[in-house]
Amino acid sequence: MNDIASIMTLGPVIPVLVIDDAAHARPIAAALVRGGIRTMEVTLRTPAALDVIREMAKVEGAVVGAGTVANEDQLRKAIDAGARFIVSPGLTETVGRPAIASGVPFLPGIANAGDIMRGMDLGLTHFKFFPAEAAGGIAALKALAAPFHECRFCPTGGVSLTTAPNWLAIPEVLCVGGSWIVPRGTQDYGAVEATAKGASQLGKPRAAA
């Protein structure tokens, strides 16, 4: 798991997690793994986030990353906490260059052609399309993917269980990010496992022969 492509292809969905209490971290991670989802993104939106990453990293089979990384200080703290990949909501050189230099797989957010070109200038080809629905949805990503055919994407933001298959049908989409798998505040680990099982079975429809 030393490159972002390997992480993005571990499964069709990366859960986007907002967890307020680190005591719930390991049970949630274990439920996701039991449900067939190994990759998980812990957003740095709560004071407990770094502790959540530390706890989830203890679960066998879990590949835990940090999301909403917006500056170099957050980057360093996330890596120190054990994050195995880094996700940012956007792409700036002040985050991008240190992230690349760290050697930790990095998935920066993009929303337009300029963002992608900035990323490619840094040597990047894998991006989070964010906020996916608000940035124009499937039509927008298809339009962007055409001139940047060497790039691969993870749409995040407004993606649901219902719409995920439509996103995954785009050849340049390797996975989607979704918050529906683990609702904020949930302690129903059985429900998390069941939802994870459904999400883990999402895939790209086969083209007709």
Image (cartoon, grey):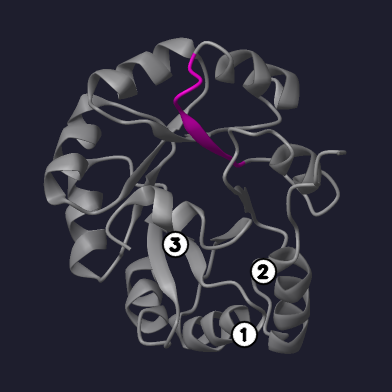
The residue under the point 22% across, 25% down is 122
Which one is earlier in the sequence, the residue at label 1 or at label 3?
A: 1
| For discs 1 and 3, the disc positioned in front in the rendered view | 1
Which one is earlier in the sequence, the residue at label 2 or at label 1?
A: 1
Q: Amino acid at mark 2?
A: Val
Q: Secondary structure at mark 1?
A: helix
Res. 44 in view: no
| For discs 3 and 2, the disc positioned in front in the rendered view | 2
> Between marks 2 and 1, how big is the CA–CA gap?
10 Å
> Between marks 1 and 3, how big is the CA–CA gap?
21 Å
Q: Assess whether mark 3 and mark 1 are in contact (beta carbons under 8 angstroms).
A: no
Q: Amino acid at mark 3?
A: Thr
Residue 45 left/right relative to 101: right
- Determine crowd level at label 2: few under 14, some 14-19, many 20+ residues with C-alpha closer than 10 A: many
> Between marks 3 and 2, how big is the CA–CA gap?
15 Å
Residue 208 left/right relative to 26: right
Q: Is residue 87 above or below residue 149?
A: below
Can you name the residue that lies furthest to the front here?
209
Residue denoted by label 1: 31
In the rendered image, residue 184, in percent from the top left (x then y), is placed at 64, 66
> Is-magenta flag for residue 22?
no
Q: Is residue 118 above or below residue 133?
A: above
Q: Is residue 196 above or below residue 14?
A: below
Report the disc number at residue 46.
Answer: 3
The residue under the point 29% across, 51% down is 105
- The magenta region covers 148-156
In the rendered image, residue 119, in percent from the top left (x then y), is placed at 32, 24
